[in-house]
Image: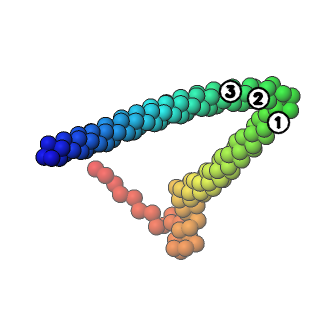
C-alpha cells in the first residue's frame, strides 16, 4: 500500500507541480501580454505625441504664412491709400497748413526784431540829443561874450575904465 500511497503522492505532487508550473506559466503569459499592451500603448502615445507635434508645427507654419500674407496685404493697402487722390489732397492740405504756420511764426520773430531795433533807435536818438545839449553847454562855457555877460550879471563885474589902466615900463 505504501507503493500506492507513494504513487498517489507522486501524482499529486506532479499535479501540484504542474498546477504551479501552469499557474506560473499563465502568469508569465499574462505578464507578456501586459508588456505587449504596455508597449503598444507606449507606441500609440509616442505616435500621438508625434502627430500632435507635427500638427503644432503645421499650425505654426500656417500662422507664419498668415502673418506674412497679412503684412503684405497691409503694405499693399497702404500703397493703394498713398496713391489715392484723397490722400494726396489731405497731405497737400497738411503741408500748406504747416507752411502757413511756419510763415506766421517767422513773421512774429521779424516783428519782435523790428520792435527791438526801433527801441534801440529811440535810445540812440535820445543819447544824440543829450550829446547835443552837452556840446551846447560846452560851447556856452567857452564863448567869451556869454562869459562876459555872466560875469556882469551874476558877479557884478564891470569893464575897466581908462583911468583904471596902469602901464608898466620895462627897461
In the displayed structure, 104 sits above or below 59; it is below
Relative placement, left or right, of 1 versus 50 is: left
> Closer to the observer: label 2 or label 1?
2
Q: Secondary structure at mark 1?
A: helix
- Within 10 angstroms of label 1, few (less than 14), some, or many (20 or more) residues? few
Q: Residue at x 13, y 46 (%)?
A: 2
Frontmost residue, 14 versus 97? 14
Residue ID for mark 3: 69
Query: Which label sits in the foreground, 3 or 2?
Result: 3
Measure the C-alpha gap from mark 2 to mark 1. 17 Å
- Residue 82 visible somewhere in the drawing: no
Q: Residues within 10 Å of mark 3 (few under 14, many from 20)?
A: few
Extreme residue toward the front, this view:
1
Tell me, for residue 77, which label it has, or none. 2
Residue closest to the eye, 38 or 34 = 34
Look at 86% across and 28% down and name the residue there.
Answer: 85
Query: So how many labels did they put on this image?
Result: 3
Where is residue 150 shown, x and y percent of the image? 56, 67
Q: Which label is found at residue 90?
A: 1
Cα separation between marks 3 and 2:
12 Å
Query: Are the residues flagged by discs 2 and 1 in contact, CB closer than 8 Å?
Result: no
Q: Residues within 10 Å of mark 2 (few under 14, many from 20)?
A: few
Residue at left 27%, top 42%?
Answer: 15
Amino acid at each position: 500500500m505504501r507503493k500506492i500511497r507513494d504513487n498517489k503522492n507522486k501524482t499529486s505532487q506532479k499535479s501540484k507541480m504542474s498546477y504551479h508550473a501552469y499557474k506560473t506559466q499563465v502568469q508569465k503569459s499574462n505578464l507578456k501580454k501586459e508588456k505587449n499592451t504596455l508597449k503598444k500603448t507606449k507606441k500609440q502615445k509616442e505616435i500621438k505625441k508625434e502627430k500632435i507635434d507635427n500638427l503644432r508645427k503645421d499650425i505654426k507654419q500656417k500662422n507664419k504664412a498668415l502673418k506674412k500674407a497679412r503684412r503684405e496685404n497691409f503694405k499693399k493697402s497702404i500703397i493703394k491709400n498713398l496713391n489715392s487722390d484723397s490722400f494726396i489732397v489731405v497731405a497737400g492740405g497738411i503741408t500748406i497748413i504747416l507752411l502757413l504756420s511756419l510763415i506766421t511764426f517767422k513773421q512774429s520773430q521779424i516783428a519782435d526784431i523790428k520792435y527791438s531795433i526801433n527801441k534801440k533807435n529811440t535810445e540812440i536818438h535820445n543819447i544824440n540829443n543829450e550829446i547835443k545839449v552837452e556840446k551846447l553847454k560846452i560851447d556856452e562855457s567857452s564863448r567869451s561874450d556869454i562869459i562876459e555877460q555872466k560875469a556882469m550879471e551874476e558877479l557884478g563885474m564891470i569893464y575897466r575904465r581908462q583911468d583904471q589902466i596902469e602901464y608898466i615900463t620895462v627897461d
